Image (spheres, helix red, strand yellow):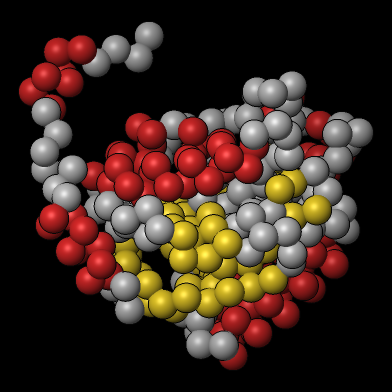
Amino acid sequence: MNKVAIVQIQSSTEKRENLRRALELVKDSNSGGADLVVFPEFLMAFSPASQTAKELAQIAEPLQGYFVTALKEAAKATRTAIVATIYETCSIPDRVYDSALWIDTEGNIAAVYRKLHLYDAFGFRESDKFAAGVDLTPPVTFEDGCYGMMICYDLRFPEMGRMLTLSGANILLAPSGWVQGELKVDHWQTMIRARALESGCYVIAPDQVGNIYIGRSMIVDPLGRTVVDLGEREGVEIIEIDFNLVHDTRAKLPLLQNRRTDIYRKHLSYD
């Protein structure tokens, strides 16, 4: 079993302050027995609507920057794996990647996922500031788990969760900054449960709270039951993942095996 800490915070516009808090939360989570700490999207900083693409690009860092380096040192010092999100520099002028990093217990970057689906919806245009990633990141094996990484808006695209679980994932991680709005809490809860139910996996979805975000960070089990819901408060909750439940659920409800890929192939079209 793995013990996972899900973190719900309100990031400020001050990168160094957000880093300080993140380092404290890693230490506290480790003291609470966590093997893995998962932070929400936009950990590095809150980007208000008034912030220009150029200004956001000036905040961004490469993977060797001080923000990531400090997190790597914390992971190694505490022997705790960390999933953290950053604004990562890219070669396109005035654009950044919205990236999730898996930092292992040795302090190494084991995986980098750059958000594929940019949130150009409900009046937002992330593509005005962000560059889209170009591929899935293979799931990361850690102790008894196999973790597939997504980010926020990716939850609305079932193909992505399915491809990650077909690649071996039994847990989906979805760091998020889910924006407030009519029915948005309902959408959030429904998407997380759907991704869990359709593939018989856990979904761990830490969310930003405050500013323009809903909070409601959640962990949902393979049967769609809510294990954690952090409501609208900042906080951390540590839970033990039951991988026997994943195995039993997939044995009783073998959705991955029951797929009719022979039929699907006849109708596949992504134009």
Question: Which quadrant of the figure has residue 8?
Answer: bottom right
Left or right: 176, with 52 as reference point? left
Pinpoint residue 165: horizontal percent, then vertical percent.
28, 48
Q: Residue furthest top?
A: 271
Of 216 and 243, nearer the camera is 216
The number of discs equals 0
What's the residue at 67%, 60% (across, down)? 231
Of 140 and 119, nearer the camera is 119
Whether residue 248 appears in this view of the structure is yes
Question: Which quadrant of the figure has residue 82?
Answer: bottom right
Left or right: 159, with 48 as reference point? left
What's the residue at 28%, 46% (across, down)? 199
Whether residue 114 appears in this view of the structure is no
Vertical arrangement, residue 239 with respect to residue 33, above or below: above
Name the quarter where the N terminus is drawn: bottom left
Vertical arrangement, residue 34 with respect to residue 59, above or below: below
What's the residue at 51%, 50% (across, down)? 174
Pinpoint residue 249: horizontal percent, then vertical percent.
21, 58
Vertical arrangement, residue 55 with respect to residue 252, above or below: above
Name the quarter where the C terminus is drawn: top left
Pinpoint residue 182: horizontal percent, then vertical percent.
70, 31
Pinpoint residue 258: horizontal percent, then vertical percent.
11, 38
Of 57 and 23, nearer the camera is 23
Question: Which quadrant of the figure has residue 220?
Answer: bottom left
Q: Residue furthest right?
A: 50
